[in-house]
Image (spheres, rainbow, N blue to C red):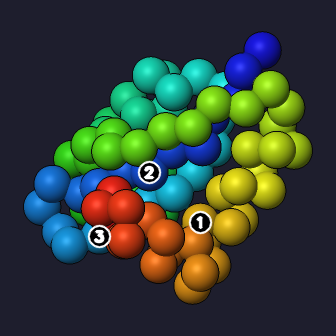
């Protein structure tokens, strides 16, 4: 089973969201349907970046990194957010 770290960009607000999942299509649908409290108010969301990992722990580690200042700077420098 693969795990993904993903970055979403709000199409209406100047905002992004980083998360991880094992089913990217379902998770994106959940975000856009308002099933996630943390992203409900800034719908719709567009997938702008993803990385694939073999284990959940690798994906979680990368997600935590992207949520740090250094990780956000990397995402900005690569034009992702």
Residues at marks 1 and 2, CA–CA distance in whole angstroms: 9 Å
The residue where tag 2 is placed is 7
**Is residue 38 visible from the viewing direction of this image?**
yes
**CB under 8 Å between callouts 1 and 2?**
yes
Which mark is first along the chain, 1 or 3? 3
Which mark is first along the chain, 2 or 1? 2
The residue where tag 3 is placed is 15
Which mark is first along the chain, 2 or 3? 2
| Left or right, 12 with reference to 3 | left
For marks 3 and 2, give the one nearer the viewer. Answer: 2
The residue where tag 1 is placed is 66
- Quarter of the N terminus within the rendering: top right
Q: Position of residue 72 (x, y in %)?
A: 49, 74
Q: The residue tagged with tag 3: helix, strand or loop?
A: loop
Kindly give the residue lying farthest to the bottom in the view shown: 69
Report which quarter residue 47 is drawn in: top left
| Left or right, 10 with reference to 22 | left
Image mark for residue 36: none
């Amino acid at each position: 089973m693969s795990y993904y770290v993903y970055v979403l960009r709000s199409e209406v607000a100047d905002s992004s969201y980083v998360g991880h999942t094992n089913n990217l299509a379902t998770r994106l649908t959940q975000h856009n349907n308002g099933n996630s409290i943390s992203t409900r108010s800034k719908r719709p969301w567009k997938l702008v970046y993803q990385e694939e990992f073999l284990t959940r722990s690798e994906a979680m580690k990368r997600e935590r990194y992207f949520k740090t200042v250094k990780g956000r700077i990397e995402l900005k420098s690569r034009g992702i957010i």
